[in-house]
Image (cartoon, grey):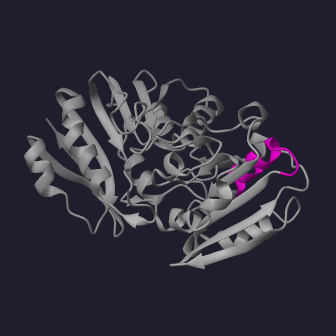
C-alpha cells in the first residue's frame, strides 16, 4: 500500500494511536484511515474521491461522512482528530473552525500537511483554542500535535465571499474555485453566452455557480444542471442561484458519475491541477466522456489556458471544433457532435 508523505509521517507515530478513537478530516489523498490501527475511527470527506467513493465493500471498514460540515453528534464518540491540511489556507481555517466547534475540550489534535500549503500557519490560526507543537518534519511535510483547550464558534454565513459581476451576485466559500476573485477564464467563457443558447445545459465543475447564472441571465428559460464533486461548491452554487433569484438543479457528481441523461450543451472551466500536482486527466475526461452525454448535434464549450492544445483529442471525439474566443491567457473551444 502506497501512502502519501503526510500519511507516512502519521505512520511513524502509529503506536500512540492504537488506543484512541480517531476522527479523520481534511485533504485525505490515500487510504491510511482504513489501515491505521485504533479502537474506532470515522472519516469526514467534503470532496468525492476515488479512494472512498466506490469501496463500501472494502475489508477494512470505516465510517464515512460525506458532507460539507460536521456536527457535535458526528464527532461525539471520538477523542482524537487527525486533520490533513489542504492547499488553501482559507479552506483549512474554514474546516478547522467547524471541527473545533464540535469537539469536546481535551480532544487530541494532530495536523499534518505540506510546507508549500502553509501548514505552519496552523499555529497562529489555532492559538486561541489550542497550542500545537511540531512532532516531526520530513520530505517537506510537518506533523503538529496539541490538545483542544477552548471552544470556538462557527457561523457558516461568515465565510462566504460575495463578488458582483454585471449585476450578478456570486457567493463563494473557501476552497471553491473563484473564492478570491472571478477567474478571467470563466469570464471569457461567459462572454460567449447569448440569448440563442437554449435547451438542456450541463455545467461540469460548477464551483461558485458563476457560469450557470451568467448563462441563465441571457437564457432564463434554459434548463440547467450544475455538478461538482466538492460539497462547498454545491453549497456555493445554491447560494449564488438564490441570491440572483434563478433556478437550476445542483448535484454532487464526480465528473459525470451521477449524470444519466443527455444535454444540448455542456459548459466547463475544467482544472488542470489535482491537488498540488498538474494533471490533465480531468480536462481529457470532460472532453472524451462529454460526447456521451450530449444529444444529437450537441455542443461542448469549455475554456482552457491558451498555451494548451486539445485539437487531437477533440478531433477523435467530435465532428468539428473551433476556438471561438481567445486572449493571451485563455481560449474557448466549441466542439460539435
- Would you say 159 lies left or right of 65 here? right
Quarter of the view holding residue 142: bottom right
- Residue at x 65% of width, y 33% of height: 243
Q: Position of residue 144 (x, y in %)?
A: 70, 68
Answer left or right for 179 relative to 103: left
Whether residue 141 sits left or right of residue 148 in the image: it is left
Visible residue check, residue 10: yes
Question: Mostly what secondary structure, the magenta segment?
Answer: helix
Residue 154 appears in the picture as rendered: no
Residue 167: image location, x then y, percent = 61, 42
Magenta segment range? 93-106
Residue 95 on the magenta span: yes
Q: Position of residue 220 (x, y in %)?
A: 46, 25
Q: In the rendered view, tell whether residue 269 sits above or below residue 265.
A: below
Q: Tell me where residue 170 appears, x and y as whole percent.
A: 60, 43
Task: Classify the position of the C terminus by image quarter.
Answer: top left
Instruction: Please tell me which residue is depicted at 85% across the width and 44% down the height of the picture.
Output: 104
Q: Is residue 202 above or below residue 22?
A: above
- Dividing the picture into quadrants, the one containing residue 92 is bottom right
Which quadrant of the view contains residue 260? top left
Q: Nearer the viewer, residue 181 or 93?
A: 93
Q: Nearer the viewer, residue 282 or 84?
A: 84
Q: Pick the residue in front: 223 or 252.
A: 252
Amino acid at each position: 500500500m502506497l501512502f502519501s508523505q503526510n500519511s507516512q509521517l502519521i505512520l511513524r507515530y502509529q503506536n500512540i494511536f492504537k488506543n484512541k478513537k480517531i476522527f479523520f478530516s481534511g485533504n485525505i489523498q490515500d487510504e491510511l484511515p482504513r489501515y491505521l490501527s485504533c479502537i474506532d475511527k470515522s472519516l469526514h470527506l467534503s470532496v468525492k474521491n476515488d479512494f472512498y467513493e466506490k469501496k463500501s465493500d472494502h475489508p477494512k471498514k470505516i465510517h464515512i461522512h460525506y458532507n460539507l460540515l460536521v456536527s457535535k453528534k458526528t464527532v461525539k464518540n471520538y477523542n482524537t482528530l487527525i486533520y490533513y491540511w489542504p492547499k488553501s489556507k482559507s479552506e483549512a481555517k474554514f474546516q478547522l473552525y467547524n471541527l473545533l466547534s464540535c469537539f469536546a475540550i481535551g480532544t487530541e489534535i494532530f495536523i499534518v500537511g505540506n510546507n508549500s500549503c502553509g501548514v505552519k500557519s496552523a499555529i497562529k490560526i489555532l492559538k486561541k483554542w489550542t497550542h500545537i507543537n511540531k512532532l516531526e518534519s520530513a520530505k517537506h511535510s510537518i506533523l503538529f500535535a496539541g490538545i483542544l483547550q477552548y471552544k470556538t464558534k462557527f457561523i457558516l454565513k461568515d465565510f462566504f465571499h460575495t463578488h458582483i459581476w454585471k449585476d450578478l451576485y456570486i457567493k463563494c466559500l473557501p476552497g471553491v474555485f473563484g473564492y478570491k476573485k472571478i477567474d478571467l477564464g470563466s469570464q471569457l467563457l461567459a462572454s460567449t453566452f447569448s440569448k440563442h443558447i437554449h435547451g438542456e445545459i450541463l455545467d461540469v465543475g460548477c464551483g461558485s455557480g458563476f457560469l450557470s447564472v451568467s448563462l441563465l441571465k441571457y437564457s432564463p428559460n434554459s434548463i440547467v444542471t450544475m455538478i461538482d464533486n466538492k460539497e462547498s461548491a454545491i453549497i456555493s452554487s445554491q447560494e449564488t442561484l438564490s441570491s440572483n433569484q434563478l433556478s437550476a438543479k445542483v448535484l454532487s457528481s464526480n465528473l459525470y458519475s451521477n449524470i444519466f441523461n443527455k444535454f444540448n450543451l455542456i459548459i466547463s472551466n475544467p482544472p488542470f491541477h489535482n491537488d498540488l500536482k498538474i494533471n490533465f486527466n480531468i480536462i481529457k475526461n470532460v472532453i472524451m466522456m462529454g460526447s456521451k452525454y450530449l444529444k444529437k448535434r450537441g455542443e461542448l464549450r469549455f475554456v482552457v489556458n491558451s498555451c494548451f492544445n486539445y485539437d487531437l483529442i477533440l478531433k477523435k471525439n467530435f465532428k468539428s471544433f473551433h476556438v471561438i474566443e481567445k486572449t493571451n491567457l485563455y481560449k474557448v473551444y466549441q466542439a460539435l457532435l
